[in-house]
Image: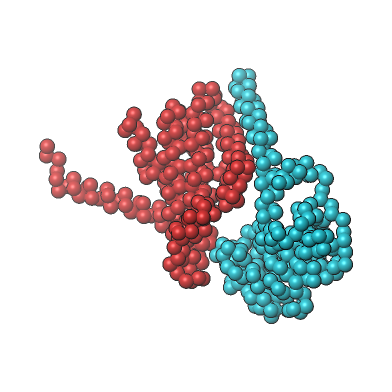
Amino acid sequence: MKSGNLEIWRQGLWDNNPGLVQLLGLCPLLAVTGTAVNGLGLGLATLFVLVISNLAVSAMRGVIRPEIRIPVFVLVIATLVTVVDLVMQAWFSSLSQTLGIFIPLIVTNCTILGRAEAFASRRPIGDALVDGLAQGTGFAAVLIVLGAGRELIGHGTLMADAHLLLGDWAHTLEITFLPQQTGLLLAVLPPGAFIGLGLMVAARNRIIRSRAERTEAAAQTHPQAA
Amino acid sequence: MLKTLLTLGLIGLLAAALLSSVHLATRDRIASEQQRQALATLNQLVPESGYDNELIEDRFSAWISGLSSPSTIYRARMESEPVALLADVTTPDGYSGDIRLLVGIEPDGEVIGVRILEHRETPGLGDKIELKRTDWLRQFTGKSLGAPPAEAWAADRRGGAFDTLSSATITSAAVIGAVRNVLAWYSANRDNAFELEAQSSASSSGSEDKGKQ
């Protein structure tokens, strides 16, 4: 059980990362990663919806016939996102002003439908919970890294406007590297999102290949004698 | 087959029931939060101590040329004397569509200040109209339609008297033009702008009453 959970985390964070490997949820991923804080905001909201939808789908897996599973998943996800949106507007209105535009975008995130279909509908609730956390964290990590990179190159800052999301103490998180208006604008505009994500995917492939080469070299110098 | 249909229908009903109960549970709170936020925005331009009327209720709709219709005009008064006029207007001339802004005017036609309420301008360029990003928006404070003269109410990149945000001339011009249009409307309606009867809509007053503190 323990090693099973570890495997699910490995899948979500690296081996089968929704942003870098499955390339799911690109619409919200590319649209809002202009800054690290936006990435963090969408990442947290997606993580939350993903966990609940995985739990709900897993709980209903005994009742749902295969023919109607897709409409049911869509219904569950859309309902959950709307509930989250309404609750945030009512009780966390300042947070909802910052995150507000991201919430409806979560419906368009195929990661959530994908996990419901590929994982949650076949596994017990405990596994579905871990998978939701792992995939959501993996997605959020990609959002934050891409957002931070684009913000750093485009605006010359890091974690700007963090106080809108995390409260006033977060002003201390803001770092300015470049004087105003010297950033490379391309990074902030939509093409910058595609280029940035492409570089991240390439970097991941490079790491995997050099690791494979190293194991191969090790296998050749130390033939399996024993 | 029938059972499958029933399952789907039942889940649909459950979802509808959940949504409508959440909607009912949050409706009043959301309305009062929105009211509070609207008032907080208005109070950025006119401090709460500066007026004694029911600012949110003392409003009417106006059709201002060059702006999307109708605009909402709020009036602040102190002991029934006009203090300020706040125009919640939307200009269609932004680089990526509508820009919604709030323009505060003194009774003599001088701009108290301008706030951006909603926009979809380019991140890093046009979004510098937001006060939290740059001070560009502050240049309107104290200006009026005579100073600078009406023909100079344009971006300096286009021969006017106002700063242009670099690489965001269209955005800058849209905001400058919107403020100018509000001022032009006010100077044409100065005599009755504070006399018109308030027309806060009766249909939404139910939720608004609960929003009042």
Q: Is residue B171 above or below residue A203?
A: below
Left or right position of A204 against A215: right
On-image quarter of the C terminus of chain A = top left
Camera-side residue of A205 and B185: B185
| Residue at x-position 73% and y-position 42% | B210
Q: Quadrant of residue B205?
A: top right
Q: Colour of chain B?
A: cyan
Camera-side residue of B127 and B51: B51
Q: Is residue B15 above or below residue A225?
A: above
Image x and y of residue B207, in percent: 75, 42
Image x and y of residue A25, in percent: 51, 46
On-image quarter of the N terminus of chain A = top left
Image x and y of residue B202, in percent: 83, 45
Residue A33 visible, this orientation: no
Q: Colour of chain A?
A: red
Q: Quadrant of residue A72?
A: top right
| Residue at x-position 58% and y-position 40% | A84
Left or right position of B38 against A38: right
| Residue at x-position 49% and y-position 47% | A43
Q: Is residue B5 above or below residue B77?
A: above
| Residue at x-position 87% and y-position 59% | B196
How many marks are shown on the rendered structure? 0
